[in-house]
Amino acid sequence: MSEPGRVTYEARDGRAYVTLDRPQKKNAMSQPMWEQLMDAYDRAEADDDVRVVVLRGAGNDFCAGHDLSEVGNQYAGGTDPDGRKRRASQRARLQYDKQYIERFQRIFTFLKPTVALVKGYCLGGGLYMAESADLVIAADNAKLGHPEQKLGLSGAAYLDAWEIVTLGARKARELLLLAEVWDAQEARMNGLVNKVVPLAELDAKGEEWAERIVRLPRDGIAIGKAATAMAMQSLGVTAQFTYGHVLHSLATNMRWEPGEYNFMKERSVKGVRASTHDREAFYDTTRKPEED
């Protein structure tokens, strides 16, 4: 089993630095990391000296999403009286997915501003984290998207309402239905990030924006975030946290027909790396048969 990684926390000068620290796996999120991330936000919210959270990734990437070796295994199916494995119930799926989406809701409705510094890969759950932040600064090498939609979700996304409001319905469907991965400039052009800077300037720009927020009055920050939450609610955006887990539970309990690529089945035979490669090849319409 690979090292599960960690999320580190440091508070100073009005900032809380929350760092996803599993660079050997492109900061793919393990279950312990999710728990530590929530703990970091709790600590930042309880500390009155913290006025802004800076969310970042160690190494070359922000976050490649949820650890694919865990995906699907989180649903406890158990065994029947004959000892055969049982499929997970819908209630088990709903319970887990509700807990999962509440992590993004925690960031989205956090009482203090969050600035996400994105570099390298920002995919799947990593992109949900960035989307949940108030501001996103991307390095020019960033790649952002939802390739996990190729697992069969086809648009059953946790933050689909936010994406439709932010990107527009057409571009949101393009991002999700086609499982697009955009470079930094395309992400900025479509409103997925606020600003793009050279990689070498990412941390400095993050410090500049954090300092501008830190100088604001603390009550003003709190009122501003409360007003934002009310606006999101009035627009119906936060309803995504009510229905998102239901859609995800249904989408992960699909029946696969002949000729369709079943990642979960292939992973059990070939492992994560090989099955991920095969998945990308299956959906690559530019690939010639002799290239397989």
Image (cartoon, rainbow, N blue to C red):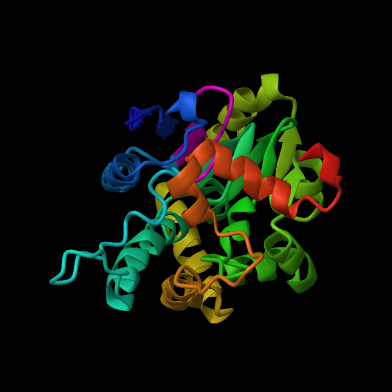
Q: Position of residue 208 (x, y in %)?
A: 61, 30
- Seen in the picture, residue 104 relative to 186 is either above or below; the reply is below
Q: Which stretch did the figure color magenta? A: 53-66
Q: In the drawing, does residue 40 fall left or right of residue 191?
A: left
Q: Position of residue 27 (x, y in %)?
A: 47, 33
Give whichever of 284, 4 is nearer the camera.
284
Look at the picture and state if 200 lies above or below 69. Answer: above
As for residue 175 lying within the magenta part, the answer is: no
Residue for point 62% across, 23% down: 204
**Is residue 217 something one can see in this rendering?**
no
Residue at point 32%, 48% (across, down): 38
Q: As drawn, which residue projects farthest toward the left? A: 81
- Coordinates of residue 90 in the picture (x, y in percent): 33, 77
Q: Quadrant of residue 261?
A: bottom right
Residue 140 in view (yes/no): yes
Give the quadrant of the C terminus: top right
Q: Tell me the quadrant of the picture where the N terminus can be found.
A: top left
Question: Along the horizontal axis of the image, is 175 left or right of 55?
Answer: right
